[in-house]
Image (tube, coloured by chain):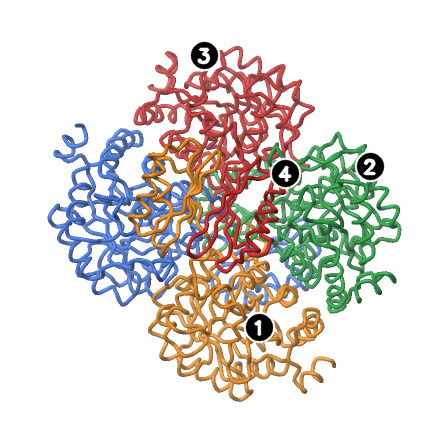
Chain colours: A blue, B orange, C green, D red
Amino acid sequence: MVVVMKERATEAQIDAVIARLIELGMDVHRSSGATRTVLGVVGDGKVDKEMIELLDGVHEVLRISAPYKRASRSYRPEDTVVTIDDVRIGGDEVIVMAGPCSAETEEQCQASAAAVKRAGAKVLRGGAFKPRSSPYSFQGLGEHGLQMLRRAADAHNLKLISEVMDVSQIPLIDQYCDIFQVGARNMQNFTLLRELGHARKPVLLKRGISATIEEWLLSAEYILSGGNNEVILCERGIRTFETATRNTFDISAVPVVKKLSHLPIIADPSHGAGRRDMVAQLARAAVAVGADGLLIEVHHDPDHALSDGAQSMFPSQFDRLMAELRIIAPAIGRSICLEPVARRGWAR
Amino acid sequence: MVVVMKERATEAQIDAVIARLIELGMDVHRSSGATRTVLGVVGDGKVDKEMIELLDGVHEVLRISAPYKRASRSYRPEDTVVTIDDVRIGGDEVIVMAGPCSAETEEQCQASAAAVKRAGAKVLRGGAFKPRSSPYSFQGLGEHGLQMLRRAADAHNLKLISEVMDVSQIPLIDQYCDIFQVGARNMQNFTLLRELGHARKPVLLKRGISATIEEWLLSAEYILSGGNNEVILCERGIRTFETATRNTFDISAVPVVKKLSHLPIIADPSHGAGRRDMVAQLARAAVAVGADGLLIEVHHDPDHALSDGAQSMFPSQFDRLMAELRIIAPAIGRSICLEPVARRGWAR
Amino acid sequence: MVVVMKERATEAQIDAVIARLIELGMDVHRSSGATRTVLGVVGDGKVDKEMIELLDGVHEVLRISAPYKRASRSYRPEDTVVTIDDVRIGGDEVIVMAGPCSAETEEQCQASAAAVKRAGAKVLRGGAFKPRSSPYSFQGLGEHGLQMLRRAADAHNLKLISEVMDVSQIPLIDQYCDIFQVGARNMQNFTLLRELGHARKPVLLKRGISATIEEWLLSAEYILSGGNNEVILCERGIRTFETATRNTFDISAVPVVKKLSHLPIIADPSHGAGRRDMVAQLARAAVAVGADGLLIEVHHDPDHALSDGAQSMFPSQFDRLMAELRIIAPAIGRSICLEPVARRGWAR
Amino acid sequence: MVVVMKERATEAQIDAVIARLIELGMDVHRSSGATRTVLGVVGDGKVDKEMIELLDGVHEVLRISAPYKRASRSYRPEDTVVTIDDVRIGGDEVIVMAGPCSAETEEQCQASAAAVKRAGAKVLRGGAFKPRSSPYSFQGLGEHGLQMLRRAADAHNLKLISEVMDVSQIPLIDQYCDIFQVGARNMQNFTLLRELGHARKPVLLKRGISATIEEWLLSAEYILSGGNNEVILCERGIRTFETATRNTFDISAVPVVKKLSHLPIIADPSHGAGRRDMVAQLARAAVAVGADGLLIEVHHDPDHALSDGAQSMFPSQFDRLMAELRIIAPAIGRSICLEPVARRGWAR
């Protein structure tokens, strides 16, 4: 923290501010220039910025960023690679996680899993518990949905990721999934984050729609500080004044996070776009900007999906997208898996 | 929902859109003008706007607002007044809820309760569980805090409001409090809202920092649809590009909510301002704009508060504010309680 | 400016940063703590923050706010009062400027002027040149409009304010008006601001819809630095994600500006609300929060106004509002003019 | 426009609304459903949405988007290609415009032009008039700057683009440049746009930092409606709550504009990023998402640039970026110019 005194602050005022900071357990380094005095403040971070700004003679208090520690690049200079068997998130390969918004039927799970596997995805996504802003919308199938998703993932040699909405759901989801997904609305559900800090599986943490990147990394810190080092960040759009898209996909978040943190970051162009006819474009942009992976909604029959049908890709669109991504990834020294069957698949 | 077709949409395209909507269980009313066709769509609200926009020939889909029912002014034209014994929130009197951010000590709870009672507050506020964005901050005293707050409220004939952060805390908080407070971060914690729909006590629902008014009313709908009609809304600032204040206090939300809904709405100028020297100004503005009450942080010794000290008022500031509010309230035909002791108190 | 070095920055890196800053003409004060080094940088403000952040070993650069000088409270501790004959903006009296959006007809100007004068306004507002976001909208009457407005102001002993959109319009508007109004869209039209710095009349500077308070004060600085000290600021709402209102009226801007600057600040609730049925509420809030005045659209026949009819008040609504404001103003030690005729007028 | 009546609106209210709309010159198509009546309104667009919303019985008014005509995709279904000799913006080739923020010296203009030409740029960018938010910053060299830029462009067979800030500068800039650039701050300077509608040269129109895409296209309409069909749009970031980057680069704007309009759209990653170490990433993303070109700041010696040095690329970085873009462009069926000399240049 840096305390900037007013140009006309008196010695008595400066001394009072220093005394208060020392009382709060901080170390203070004073630097007096020709026009004003600046105090460098070091300690364990418990001082309230606004509190100091209210003291007499203080012009403003500047907080040095990054109150997070374990999530920061300076804590761990090399990239974290989250590994689940042979799937490495944060390495050279761009990892694609794809599947339906929600598990609906056995046939749908199997067909969607087959389609995304064929195109080169490594992880199956699918929800069993859905957070919906209206109490009158479809709320998910619960454990039955998880069972169908697990069977589909196993049948096609895919890992499985699914959303956890509440502490009480952790044990159940833990039985079926390889990665816990925390949705945007729960990014600051600290009770949930703290509990996931004790889980033995990776956690994908989506950015809240109004969360700054700093707050997002602080939320990651909750998980990391519990002992779970396997956190994957996921950008999915923020809320702005623009209404032409449901959210504004913050593409810059990828290079910013890469600079501030060692954690892998992937992108969710489906929620970023909100509609199928823009998903491919944003997915391409995300790979070009340097994202470590993608989370994409694909449904074998989107027109009849029970949720998020409009933003779910048709399998044929997904095939074409994966082909485009295979051209783009090498531009930044990366690759995207090309399964033998897929190689034949999309070219027809 | 209204579907606006493109100017050059063909009859076949129009027919296909109508057929799809009927398949989804909707009633469709077609209106064809000189330049384009518009379809009025009525039904139970399960159609995805984006899904229809993807159909051929569709220009755009306009959603008629207010997917909430019970929260809307048209569902209940007269104002809802939430009543707890002799405290009526939403009536002619502006109700002030005040007290410390967190319960810290017996002495602090008692001194703060005495101070706010003396000035005219009707409800004591205070937290026992604190949501903090950093895992390294003070997290609250739990049940011990609730006990101290209850004793302080009873000793000064005040009602008590305290925050509930998770479903698991409901039974405990229910034992001690008169009003459940749901914080901004939990405004879309639907599991929590649904459960509070079954509670027998009023719920104060703060607006999320990036929530639209429509989303806020939808969250209220979760509680109302569970059978609990006693919901109090609370504006506390939204996130915008402006950084001079921690949040942007959305004063317009009060008249907008009054128009759209029958629920009472109060204002939290402490979080809206983020610093003590702006709380009084915003509190005055909130009463002048027509808020039904205020939620204000007052601490008997803010400089040593364990949390939110910078935005907590000194008792003397709170006294002065209450005196100002007593002048303003009559301008819009309202009153603010004047205790005998208070009348003497602040005038000295 | 404060340069915060990384925790592991080397001496060589620190020396290089200091050398670069000195090369740029700055004075540097070094403060080395246990964990990191902080550099206080003082000079004439030409150093690019981002440029320094790109240097090796730099964690971040914190800019000390207020690059403006003449607009700042520290430059001039006492309040500026802008005086036009007996009208004093920034003093004890809350000054109300009211009138139609645009001058349309002689009758309309006269009727509107009579109505606002009767209720207690001191300044007539009205546009002759209109910035419209669509090229197909009404663009104003030009000099003919100014002539009608001037006659109406003179007939009712009111001062006149009108908008200037371009440098080329300054001489013309100068002939007819007492105050130049700069609209939100021109807040960063630096060519215009610079020229108004040489004018001999007060300038009312509206806040841009996406301008921070700091940028707004910097724009005021353009005018002040040209030698024109009579700048009045005007808050009129900012753009946020909320769409329930056209803009979000930033009520906190008033106390923030009062703290940072000595300039008077008024509020424009008409544009802040965007619709007539919310103007009175916001106007009351603005006076309660401490604004020095109001700018309100009043039309003798709003339903037939050529522009902004929806946000123009009827004269009877304006009368009632002024009566309410006369109750509120004393709460903060202020008054609002009560003309003899008005006293009889609205009470009937 | 679509007028949605309240569920309980009376016949008299509905009739009154229809009568008012007809009085305003509109055609009205009534559609009465089981629960409410919806009115489709067609006409020349002069009706104020808020005005109708104030009428009795009206629930809300939904505006059908796209009040612009000539800028819309439905007005001209095929893509507009802006052509300047052999440079085609909006065709298969991705056009790169690059150069320094401001013209400073003959040597700098020549060196920068040589560098960008060598890497494959087709247009030289450079400013002679600079809009600066502080009155104390460098303001540009004026005509002398334009002369140096023109000589540098001619010497390297490049087209030239430069910013016009005011109507009065049009004739001068017209003498030297091939494309007029309108900056973000002037996106709603309607006087300037109207005048450029009569120019005989292409206009690059940057998006305002708080402009919606609809407002941006309306501003383009000002130019198009004057008879100048050669408008190029340029996304450069919008203002949001996130402060980790100077602006939030709205990558989705590219596909949205492609859908709504026939005009070419390019991206300015330099302003979108605000710092050099993120420009390449955003430039790659922009090409991958489908932008028709790029506008990039390149300086032969950015550390000593008089403005925007921090966001200007070194020539070697620009070379590398162009090489990456040549890999990405074919993924979406596009190319980027590869000059013979460049082919040898960057490969070393």
Which of discs 4 and 1 lies nearer the camera? The answer is: 4
Q: Mark 2 packing: few (<14 Cα in 10 Å), some, or many (20+)? A: some
Q: Is residue A267 visible?
A: no
- Residue type, label 2: Asp
Which percent across, then down, holds residue D165? Answer: 64, 28
Identify residue for label 2. Answer: C174
Identify residue for label 4. Answer: D133
Which of discs 3 and 1 lies nearer the camera? The answer is: 3
- Residue type, label 3: Asp
Which percent across, then down, holds residue D243? Answer: 50, 47
Same chain for the residues at labels 3 and 2, yes or no? no
Which of discs 4 and 2 lies nearer the camera? The answer is: 2
Identify residue for label 1. Answer: B302
Dots 4 and 2: beta carbons under 8 Å?
no
Q: Chain of mark 2?
A: C
| Label 3, label 4: how far apart the Cα atoms are | 37 Å
Q: Chain of mark 3?
A: D
Which of discs 1 and 2 lies nearer the camera? The answer is: 2
Which percent across, then down, holds residue D189? Answer: 63, 33
In terms of secondary structure, where does tag 4 sit? loop
Which of discs 3 and 4 lies nearer the camera? The answer is: 3
Identify residue for label 3. Answer: D86
| Label 4, label 1: how far apart the Cα atoms are | 39 Å
Classify residue B36 by image quadrant. Answer: top left
The residue positioned 32% from the left and 39% from the top of the image is B16
